[in-house]
Image: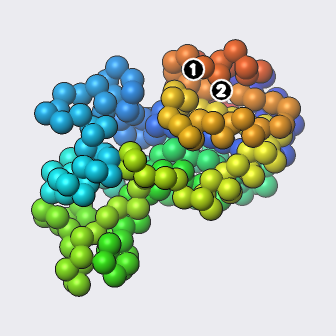
Amino acid sequence: MATLKELVSNSSRIVFFGGAGVSTESGIPDFRSQDGLYNQKYSVPPETILSDTYFYSHTEEFYRFYRDKMLPLNAEPNAAHKKLAEWEQEGKLLAVVTQNIDGLHQKAGSKRVFELHGSIYRNHCLSCGKSFSAEYIKESAGIPRCGCGGIIKPDVVLYGEPLDENTILGAVRAIAAADLLIVAGTSLSVYPAASFLSYFRGEHLVLINRDKTPLDDECELVIHEKVGEVFSTL
C-alpha cells in the first residue's frame, strides 16, 4: 500500500482500467468468479441470453433476465468510484476506462469515462431512435416498446456486437498517454477490451484484483485484494 500511495502521489496522468470487480462492493455481482452471474444455474446460459442473436430471437425472455439481473438502479458508488472522481477533480486522473455498464463512475462524479460495453442508462427505439431511461425499462412489462411501436434496446454491447469505435479510440488514446495505469477488478479474459492495455507506454503498471490474472507477471505492483478496500486506504 505504501508503494501504491507513492506511485499515485508522483503521477499526474493516471488512467484507471476497471472491470466487474470494481462494483462488487456496491452490491453488484461479477460474472466469472465462483459466485458470479455466469456460474449461477439458468435453463439458458447467461452468456447466451446476453447475446445479440438471443435479444432479437427471444426478446421477451431477454428482458425478463435483463430486468432481474442487469438493472441495479439503487446501487451506490463505493470507495473506488469516489476516489477516482476525486482524482479527476484534482487533475491527476486522465480518464476511467470501464467494462462495466452500471454507471457508478458517473454517479460518483467522474466526467471522462469510456464505457467500453455501453450503459444501462441509455436505451433507444430500434425504429425511430427515441431515447428512454433505465427506469422506463425497469418498470415496463414484457417487451418495452416506443410510442411508435418499435422495440426498445439497451445501449449495451451484447455478445456478437462490435464495440463503439469512438469509445475505443478515446480509451486507447487515454491509455497511451498515461504515466500510471491502474488495472483493477478484471480477469482480463474479455476481448477486445483486455487487449487495449498493450497501448500503455508509461512507467508504472499496477494491478489490483482479488484473483490472479494473466497480467500479474508484467506489472510493477500487484495487490490481490478487493478493489474498494484498497482504495479506501488511499
In this rendering, the answer to whether 226 lies above or below 133 is above
Q: Is residue 192 left or right of residue 159?
A: right
Q: Is residue 85 visible?
A: no
Which residue does the image show at 50% across and 35% down from the upper left? 190
Which residue is identified by label 2? 207
Q: Is residue 178 visible?
A: yes
| Amino acid tagged 1 | Thr
What percent of the width, then of the height, locates residue 173? Answer: 75, 52
Nearer to us: label 2 or label 1: 1
Which residue does the image show at 25% across and 44% down from the upper left? 49
Mark 2 residue element: strand
Comes first in the chain, label 2 or label 1: 2
What percent of the width, then of the height, locates residue 161? Answer: 43, 52
Which one is nearer the viewer's eye here, 92 or 191?
A: 191
Mark 1 residue element: loop
Which residue does the image show at 55% across and 29% down from the upper left? 188
**Disc 2 and disc 1 in contact, CB within 8 angstroms:** yes
Which residue is identified by label 1? 213
The quadrant the C terminus occupies is: top right
In this rendering, the answer to whether 45 lies above or below 130 is above
Give the CA separation, mark 2 to mark 1. Answer: 9 Å
Instruction: Give the class, few, some or many, for how many residues have Cα within 10 Å of label 1's Cα (few <14, many ≥20).
Output: some
In the image, farthest residue toward the bottom: 148
The quadrant the N terminus occupies is: top right
